[in-house]
Amino acid sequence: MRAATLKGAQRALMSACMPAPVAARARTLASASPAVCSCSYSSTSSSSSPLATLGSSLGLCGRQQRPFARINSSSSARSRRALRPLATAAVEARRGPAAPAKDQVLTSDPANNVTEYIYSKMGINLHHQPNHPIGIIKQAIYDYFEQGSPGVFKAFDDMYPVVACTANFDEILIPADHVSRSPNDTYYVSADKVLRCHTSAHQAELLRTKQPAFLVTGDVYRRDSIDATHYPVFHQMEGVRIYGPADWEAAGLEATAFAERELKSALEGLAKHLFGDVECRWVDAYFPFTEPSFELEIFFNGKWMEVLGCGVMEQVILDKNYGEGHKAWAFGLGLERLAMVLFDIPDIRLFWSDDDRFLKQFKAGDLNSKFKSYSKFPPCYKDMAFWVSPEFTENNLCELVRGIGGDLVEEVVCIDNFTNPKTQRTSNCYRITYRSMERSLTDEEINGLQARVRQGVAEQLKVELR
Ligand code: FA5
Ligand code: MG
């Protein structure tokens, strides 16, 4: 993992939601393989339920390293499975307008920090497009849960993306002074409303409707870094399942241990269902709304990529919103990341392409197609050094660069920094990679963009260009 691209606490809600020392520890765990727990999957059939076998073979293993897991399942095994789609009737959504009205998102409220660029992505709802990789993977996950537990999960995939801060943060125990609430990380519509930064924003509300198991899919928004696996708009699916004492007593387990086992079984089964053969590993994590908490990473394009966060729901959330005497697990997975692995899509920007050469490669229900790059156009690198000020943040830089360069920006990475011992001033050097997915770029075009970026940085970010 490139240290310079880890944007401190802003990187993800996992790290953003934890106190600094825990964040530092979790980042170490996530980046250094010796600190990682590996999953041990059974690749052959066994007499007991495959889910039970997978689940009980797992567990956190402290700092001890075990061989990385490999999930084996042939594509013929995959196609043999008769999948029943999650009943359409179960896709009961609170229907919001397809695209929120502009004046409801780009408000004149002084707290508003949503940009035109972000607004332009709203209402596109890639997860509603059956032939789009995001729509295909959503349906495949719905099918998996329906197959494993027929009629149990209720799906919601049209919940309104503008939510109250109470729903996005308070109701799931994110502390009032927490960094993830900062306008550096989150898009505020007004002082008390945000563009949801995760589908966990709907947890408490749906618990109050007494659904014992649900899946929520939607577009989520974050001010974040820029690279092949991070985009300011992406899609998550939240899953929650609630159990009663009869469930853990029948299993002969204590409630939390039971929920953890079921959670990991379900998610390993999902990975196997989607990918067949893939290397993955469990990593210790921290979320304010689950304990214990984990992340699942998959080895993709030569690196470990985090695809989901999960854990046993904090009891107070369940007691308060659903009722006492139960136990639940919850997960939140990134649909783009899973689709990248499944379809071999190398860059997250491609999901937003309206180029037929991309879109025509995917078809509803087909989990076997692999993306064929139609052409690889050359990147163009531009470096920019400046003296930072106390107000400077990388998320602000990324927002500005994305606002000017749009999807031509492939990556923004800090390649160098130093502090002058005499003046104590710090200089950062950023490399911006420009590359189109669809065409060759001209020097003139890139020079024009870079000049606007430099001007924007100097004027808006309160830094001094060198
Ligand atoms: C969360 O968002 C938690 N709400 C997940 C959760 C739900 C934990 C329920 C426990 C219980 P995190 O910030 O790690 O966690 O994001 C979850 C997933 O979203 C990541 O694993 C990744 O797959 C995806 N993701 C996060 N940031 C981005 C981004 N900028 N671009 C694309 N995908 C992203
Ligand atoms: Mg995370």
Image (cartoon, rainbow, N blue to C red):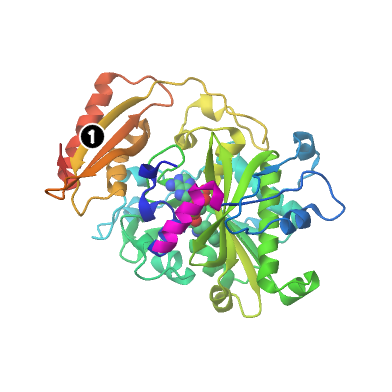
User: Does 279 appear above or below 327?
Assistant: above
The N terminus, quarter of image: top left
**Residue 234 is at least partly visible in this image:** no
Residue type marked 1: Met
Classify residue 309 by image quadrant: bottom right
Q: Position of residue 89 (x, y in %)?
A: 67, 56
| Left or right side of 179 for 366 | right
Q: Residue furthest bottom?
A: 324
Residue 407, x across and y down, in percent? 38, 34
Q: Quadrant of residue 116?
A: top left
Residue of label 1: 384
Question: 54 and 82: which one is in front?
Answer: 54
Magenta extent: 21-35
The main secondary structure of the magenta stretch is helix
Nearer-the-camera pick, 63 or 347: 63
Residue 32 is covered by the magenta coloring: yes
As drawn, the residue found furthest toward the left would be 423
> Is any atom of residue 299 visible in this view?
yes
- Quadrant location of the C terminus in the rendered image: top left
Where is residue 289? Give x, y as percent.
51, 67
Along the viewing direction, whichever of 412 and 117 lies nearer the viewer: 412
Q: Residue at x 58, y 62 (%)?
A: 311
User: From what the image shows, is residue 131 above or below residue 419?
Assistant: above
